[in-house]
Image (cartoon, rainbow, N blue to C red):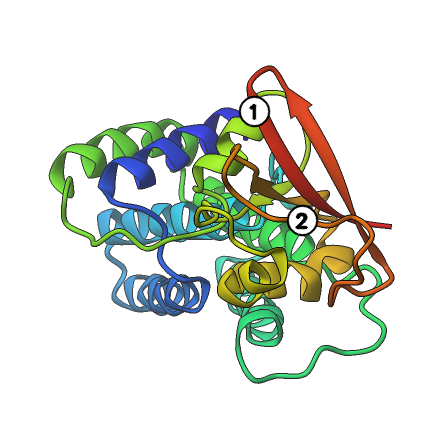
């Protein structure tokens, strides 16, 4: 799965960048509906194509939250194709519930133990792979071909959308530190840290979900004439987070980390 995630990430960057998560969610639900349509019509080629699209878009959502997916195993036992589709619909609904809480208007539940986005994306993909297995589709083999096709066919089709998983800051940082990180935009020359916090909206998203999803940190680049950060000043960061300064070669970073 790591190789697939990396190939899909490279494809998305080649095409222009990730959709905003709620837009990606809308595409996921659209494809889940098209899986149902293909099953109802009994069109094998169309069903295979729609299952592949569900795998790609759900993997995109996982990438956006720095999730390392586990290889999905095929469901054992006597499970019908219809039951597997119901599982796909159910898990897509769980993904929607979580993303609406992270990115939309739904309130987060106080107790979310065991209800991470990773859990439901993996269960969604397990049902997809199991349905493909029952239909005698080699979905993983076909997935590589689909990635190559989309990279060529759709190049330049989408406008670039800034995303904390594609910022240069995090791409540079994870070359030095392994983990699940988001990255911030480049500070303006001599910008105060409190002003930067107001301008970098993804930091507020990170603080909202970092503990639930197990994100390791939010990386902020620190050029020589960049951020004016005073370690003795009290910033509007919850007590469950702390800020550290790190240097690797010529690269300097501030990293907001969960306690």
Q: Is residue 85 visible?
A: no
- At 40% from the left and 36% from the top, the residue drawn is 9
* Marking on residue 161: none
**Mark 1 neighbour class, 10 Å CA radius: few under 14, some 14 to 19, many 20 or more:** some
In the image, residue 148 above or below residue 12 = above
Q: Name the residue under label 2.
A: 229
In the image, residue 215 above or below residue 10 = below
Q: Is residue 200 visible?
A: yes
Residue 246 place in picture, x, y as percent: 71, 30
Residue 202 appears left or right of 8: right
Mark 2–mark 1 CB contact (< 8 Å): no
The single residue placed furthest to the top in the displayed view is 249
Front-most of 192 and 250?
192
- At 63% from the left and 21% from the top, the residue drawn is 176
The CA span between labels 2 and 1 is 16 Å
Q: SS class of the residue under badge 1?
A: strand
Q: Mark 1 points at which residue?
A: 251
Front-most of 57 and 141?
57
Residue 158 place in picture, x, y as percent: 20, 52
Residue 136 appears left or right of 255: left
Q: SS class of the residue under badge 2?
A: loop
Residue 5 place in picture, x, y as percent: 48, 34
Can you tell which quarter of the image residue 144 is in?
top left
- At 37% from the left and 53% from the top, the residue drawn is 162
Front-most of 87 and 92?
92
Quadrant of the snapshot with the N terminus: top right
Residue 41 place in picture, x, y as percent: 25, 66
**Mark 2 neighbour class, 10 Å CA radius: few under 14, some 14 to 19, many 20 or more:** some
Dot 2 or dot 1: first in sequence order is 2
Residue 253 appears left or right of 47: right
Residue 129 appears left or right of 140: right
């Amino acid at each position: 799965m790591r190789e697939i995630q990396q190939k899909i990430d490279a494809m998305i960057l080649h095409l222009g960048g990730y959709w905003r998560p709620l837009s990606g969610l809308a595409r996921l639900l659209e494809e889940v509906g098209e899986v149902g349509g293909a099953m109802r019509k009994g069109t094998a080629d169309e069903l295979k194509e729609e299952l592949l699209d569900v795998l790609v878009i759900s993997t995109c959502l996982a990438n956006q939250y720095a999730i390392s997916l586990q290889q999905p195993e095929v469901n054992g036992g006597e499970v019908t194709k219809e039951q597997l589709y119901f599982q796909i619909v159910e898990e897509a609904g769980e993904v929607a519930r979580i993303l609406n809480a992270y990115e939309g208007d739904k309130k987060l539940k106080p107790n979310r133990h065991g209800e991470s986005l990773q859990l439901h994306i993996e269960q969604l993909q397990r049902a997809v792979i199991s349905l493909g297995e029952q239909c005698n589709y080699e979905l993983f083999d076909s997935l590589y071909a689909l990635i190559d096709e989309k990279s060529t066919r759709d190049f330049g089709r989408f406008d670039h959308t800034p995303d904390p998983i594609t910022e240069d800051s995090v791409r540079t940082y994870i070359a030095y530190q392994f983990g699940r990180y988001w990255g911030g935009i480049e500070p303006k020359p001599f910008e105060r840290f409190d002003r930067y916090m107001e301008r970098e909206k993804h930091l507020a998203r990170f603080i909202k979900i970092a503990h639930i999803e197990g994100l390791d940190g939010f990386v902020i680049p620190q050029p020589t004439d960049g951020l004016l950060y005073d370690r003795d000043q009290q910033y509007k960061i919850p007590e469950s987070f702390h800020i550290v300064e790190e240097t690797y070669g010529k690269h300097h970073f501030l990293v907001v980390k969960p306690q």
